[in-house]
Amino acid sequence: MTLSFDDLGLAEPLLRAVRAENYTQPTPIQAQAIPHLLDGRDLLGIAQTGTGKTAAFALPILERLSANPVPRKRGAVRALVLTPTRELAVQIVENFRTYGKHLGLRTAVIFGGVGQQPQVENLARGLDILVATPGRLLDLMNQRHADLRDLSILVLDEADRMLDMGFIHDVKRIVATLPKERQTLFFSATMPNDVEKLANNILKEPVRIEVTPPATTVERIDQRVYFVDAGNKNALLADLLKDPAIERVLVFTRTKHGADRVVKHIERIGIEAQAIHGNKSQSARQRALNDFRDGNTRVLVATDIAARGIDVDGITHVINFEIPNVPDTYVHRIGRTARAGRDGVALTFCDKSEKGLLRDVERLTRKPLTVIHEHSFHGPAAKPAQAEQHTESRGGGRERGHDRGHDRGRNQRRDQRHERGHEPVQEYGEAREAGQEARAAKPHRQRAHQPSRDQHPNDQRGRDQQGRDQYPRNQQGRDRQGRDQRGRDRHERDHQERDQHARNEHDRSQEGRRHEGRGHEGRGHEGREHEGRGHEGRRQEDRRHERGEQAVAQEQRPQRQAPRQRQTPQPHPAHKPGDRPMHRPGGGQPQSEGAAQPRDKRPHRHRRRRPQQAQA
């Protein structure tokens, strides 16, 4: 029996809004979830994107809030929906406004990246439904702008994505402030262990609804893969965009800068394209999304952070320009197409380095991708990922690691040389076999001064030559190794000789300084005069040093000289006996005639010169 929205027990205003959106029959998750949610049960829903889960929780929330009106309080919120991205928050609040346009409920959206004052003003008037990202809501709660004590309904949408983006701790802090008596709805496209643990902690006897098995893709999506060189991905994308059947395409890259480069290449061929990623402002991201939704932009290039925030009807193709590192992300990427019962196409570009990622995707989805061979940009990876056979057993990882690491770098360098026109591209195994055949066909060149093993079959030189002919590379390596070792030994000997020479020179210089010091201390002026005589004086000093330090000290011991007597200054010739005592020119104390003048205590450079005595 086929159900309709009239059979779900919704109010007439909601049914009018649903009919205006051309909704005739509910999707499986809507048909299973709406009756339980109208009864107030907790729900654990596992559904992929594009299955209609937004309407599955929005319609019963609007029904319950409109049936129980309450006065609005400042900062109070009755229903809260937490989402991981800003784009998804904007689209959810638009769905709430579309479905509840005849109910008169007040809704608002809160996210980061913009000013908070308009959001604070909306909270101050009180809200019936609030859609928010965890980070900005937690900031406003810490500033006491949001009051969640009267909350009655909590919705966690895309819980696994919030876990991947690191919002799980903010979610736990928000949930800790909520009242215990509430209805909790938990939706996730995948169910990892951490997400399941969080669901068990916040849900009370939930109804589990699993529309499709976890991590399986929508069956209506035609999934294809193109094996192509990394340098030819832009050319392949430009060639595919020439097809008019690709009306509205969403291209996914792993990095923000990669998205900008793809946009520049697409615009270079005359196709309108825009990028949406974390480096863009919120206004620029919303403007690009609106242009893509309105049909003004044919190609929208996005990163994985925006993969779950793009809900645009009519996306005909999704192109994975680069395969995501996490297989679950592939499911959310291609879920942007084949929405609302339509068909869609997902195209994936795979180069040599991404074959392991492709295997992970196929293992997760349990469905091999269709390989497209009809294109002009084949690369060395042009083989199905599951067709590879490993030579070793399951336990040995050496061969697989070698293929993923060493061969990958070698093949990438070879591809780069091919792009520059240096050499043709061929598989590593074919090149190795061709090289072995060439070496087998070409005889080894023998040196003229060495006899061959035919001339000296029993001689040691013949056996050495035979070994070199049989193992030419090993012998060359040993010869080169021997030359390197001899060079290192020679370098070490030279280094030791230089060190020994430097130590001898140092000892001789120290000995010479000791001899010179003894000569200066013992001889005084005589030693300096003796030193000035040149080499003869040094030879005599060396001979005296050989006779013993004690004899040298006794022989060169200086004679103590008597102290010099201070001369008594003579009186001025013009001074006569009986005159007044004369003062010193420097201003000292008056002295009697014939008395010794006191010595000036100032330093020598400050003393005044005494006047010269006049000649009699």
Image: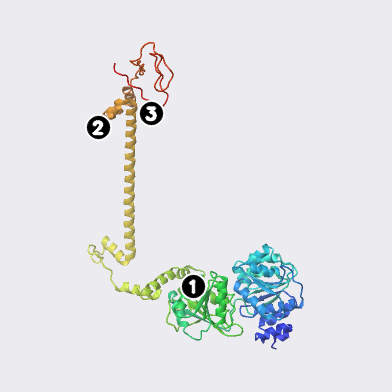
Q: State the CA–CA distance, disc 1 to disc 3.
A: 81 Å
Residue drawn 31% across the image and 26% down it:
525
- Closer to the N terminus: mark 1 or mark 3? 1
Amino acid under disc 1: Asp
Secondary structure at badge 1 equals: helix
Q: Looking at numbered disc 2 in the image, what kind of residue is underneath it? A: His
Up-down relation of residue 238 to residue 74 (above or below): below
- Crowd around label 1: few <14 · some 14–19 · many ≥20 (10 Å): some
Confirm whether residue 546 shows in the render. Answer: no
Quadrant in which the N terminus is drawn:
bottom right
Q: Nearer the viewer, residue 10 or 420?
A: 10
Asked where in the image residue 483 lies, by quadrant, the reply is bottom left
Q: Earlier in the sequence, mark 2 or mark 1?
A: 1
Q: Residue 554, can we see it?
A: yes
Q: Nearer the viewer, mark 2 or mark 3?
A: 3
Which x, y percent locates residue 272?
49, 79
Q: CA distance from mark 2 to mark 3?
A: 40 Å
Query: Of helix, strand and loop, which one carries label 2?
Result: helix
**Mark 2 and mark 1: span between their CA atoms?**
83 Å
Measured as percent of width and height from the top left, residue 131 is found at 66, 72
Task: Identify the residue position indicated by label 2 in the image.
Answer: 535
Residue 133 is labelled as none
Residue 260's label in the rendered image is 1
Amino acid, disc 3: Arg
Query: Are the residues flagged by discs 1 and 3 in contact, CB closer than 8 Å?
Result: no
Observer-nearest residue: 152 or 191?
152
Using the rendered view, name the quadrant where residue 522 is placed: top left
At x 34% / y 27%, what residue is drawn?
Answer: 521
The residue labelled by disc 3 is: 605
Report the residue at 34% width, 46% height from top: 496
